[in-house]
Structure formats: C-alpha cells, structure tokens
Amino acid sequence: SVSAGTRRIVALTGTRALEHRKQVEATLEAAANSLACSPDAVAEAIRTLVQDVRALKKQLAGGGGAQAPTTAAKKPAVASGYAAKRAVLREASRLLNVSMSDVLARIAAMQEDQSKLKQWVVRKSSWRRHLAQLLI
C-alpha cells in the first residue's frame, strides 16, 4: 500500500528491460508501417488520422460538404535514440487515448473507421444527387 502523496516507482531491469525496449521499438516500427510514414512522423500521422475521422463524422452528421481540415505539418524531431522513440510512442498513445501496447490495434480500428466513413460519405453524396435529379 502506498500512502497519500507518495508515488510508486516501477522499474524494469535486466532481460525484462531489454524485452520492453525491443517491444517499444517494434511497436513504433509497426505503427510507422501501418501509417505509411517514418517512425519520427507517427504522432503527426495519428493526429492527421484522428482529425480526418472527426471531419468525416461531422460531414456525415451535418450533411455538409466540408473536407477534412488540413493542418500545417510540423517537422517531427528525429527519433534516433530509445528515449526519443519511446517519447514518440507515448505521444501516439496519448493521442489515441490508449496504452502504448494498444496503439497498433487502435490505429487499425481508426483506419477501418476512416475507410467506412469515406464510403458512407460517397453514398450520401450520390443519394443527394439522385434525390436532386428526382426533384427536378
């Protein structure tokens, strides 16, 4: 039990530390492959994916024809060392609101949502065109 105002420190040592390091690096590399970007740009690619999904949902809900907002891309810092790679993965997990170990699954789910939402936007657009032709 930890008393109030006290923080517990958990550390990995030895082979567990090496395994964790390899897992972090592999997860970051897999995320980069999934997002078709460099490991340095994973957080920015996730930010763009999240914004695109939000914009598509708004477009479907409101019926507006607005496109996804584009933001000026920030030049990511080069994640060369382990600490930098872990920081990029931590930022990715924060953006997705999941643990670092769940980043890959959440990226896949968001990409699937994005694909389905794009299909629905196209369908809705064609329905509107069809309805407009019927009314003319």
Image (cartoon, rainbow, N blue to C red):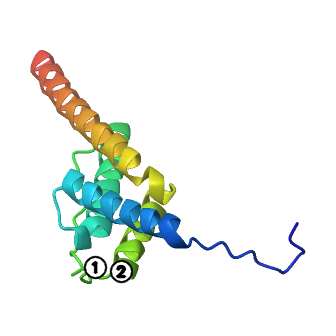
Tell me the residue that label 2 is attached to: 84
Compare residues 94 and 47 and report the one nearer the observer.
94
Asked if residue 63 shows in the view, the reply is: no
Q: Does residue 96 sit above or below 18 in this rendering?
A: above
Residue at x 46% of width, y 54% of height: 101
Q: Amino acid at mark 2?
A: Ala
Q: Does residue 98 sit above or below 131 in this rendering?
A: below
Residue at x 39% of width, y 44% of height: 105
Q: Amino acid at mark 1?
A: Ala
Residue at x 90% of width, y 74% of height: 3
Dot 1: within a 10 Å radius of its alpha carbon, few (fewer than 14), some, or many (20 or more) residues?
A: some
Q: Which mark is residue 127?
A: none
Dot 2: within a 10 Å radius of its alpha carbon, few (fewer than 14), some, or many (20 or more) residues?
A: some
- Quadrant where the image shows the N terminus: bottom right
Q: Position of residue 64 (x, y in %)?
A: 27, 44
Compare residues 21 and 61 and report the one nearer the observer.
21
Circle 1 — which element?
A: loop
Compare residues 122 and 77 and report the one nearer the observer.
77
Residue at x 41% of width, y 54% of height: 103
Tell me the residue that label 1 is attached to: 79
Circle 2 — which element?
A: helix
For residue 130, side relative to residue 92 (left or right)? left
